[in-house]
């Protein structure tokens, strides 16, 4: 049996975004240990969007990134992220920290898309 190797990576988030992320992970039933799974799903859905480079570029405008978040990402997804980084850099050559911005954009998009598709009571 071949185990899917995981790669550890860390990104910085704004405090309020990190808090919203933690709340959503629990609300969605992933539990305290489901953070990586939730973020991996967010990254995969972002990479399916045709305009993801634009969303990554928008994420570059985030400031006050004070909270460090570590996630374990499957090696094959990390390779797809690396390919996406190259793709984004072709459109936005001056962008810094593309990988972190891609993960931040994934989190923001999943939070936004879920909150618009679920009516809150």
Image (spheres, rainbow, N blue to C red):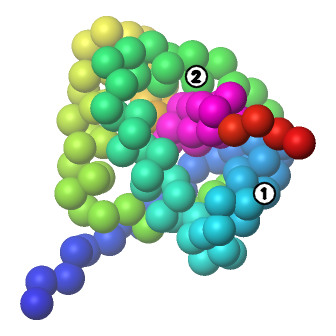
Image disc number at residue 78: none
Q: Position of residue 115 (x, y in %)?
A: 70, 36
Q: Identify the residue at image location x=21%, y=57%.
A: 76
Q: Is residue 110 left or right of residue 21?
A: left
Q: Identify the residue at image location x=78%, y=57%.
A: 23
Q: Position of residue 60 (x, y in %)?
A: 58, 22
Task: Check disc 2 and report its element: helix, strand or loop.
Answer: loop
- How far apart are the alpha carbons under marks 1 and 2? 23 Å
Query: Dividing the image into 4 quarters, which one contains the C terminus?
Result: top right
Residue 106 within the magenta-colored segment of the rendering = yes
Task: Check disc 1 and report its element: helix, strand or loop.
Answer: helix
Label 2 Cα neighbours within 10 Å, binned few <14 / some 14-19 / many ≥20 = some
Compared to residue 103, the image places residue 21 above or below, namely below
Q: Main secondary structure of the magenta part?
A: helix
Residue bearing mark 1 = 23
Residues drawn in magenta: 103-117
- For marks 1 and 2, the one nearer the N-term is 1
- Of badges 1 and 2, nearer the viewer stands 1
Q: Position of residue 53 (x, y in %)?
A: 39, 19
Q: Work out whether residue 100 can be spotted.
A: no
Q: Work out whether residue 41 can be spotted.
A: yes
Residue bearing mark 2 = 60
């Amino acid at each position: 049996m071949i185990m899917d190797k995981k790669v550890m990576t860390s990104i910085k988030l704004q405090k309020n975004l990190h808090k919203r992320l933690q709340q959503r992970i629990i609300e969605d039933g992933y539990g305290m240990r489901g953070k990586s799974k939730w973020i991996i799903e967010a990254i995969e859905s972002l990479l399916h969007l045709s305009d993801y480079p634009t969303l990554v570029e928008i994420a570059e405008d985030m400031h006050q990134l004070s909270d460090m978040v570590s996630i374990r990402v499957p090696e094959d997804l990390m390779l797809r992220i690396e390919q996406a980084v190259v793709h984004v850099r072709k459109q936005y050559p001056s962008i810094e920290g593309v990988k972190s911005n891609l993960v931040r954009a994934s989190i923001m998009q999943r939070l936004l898309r879920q909150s618009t598709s679920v009516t809150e009571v």
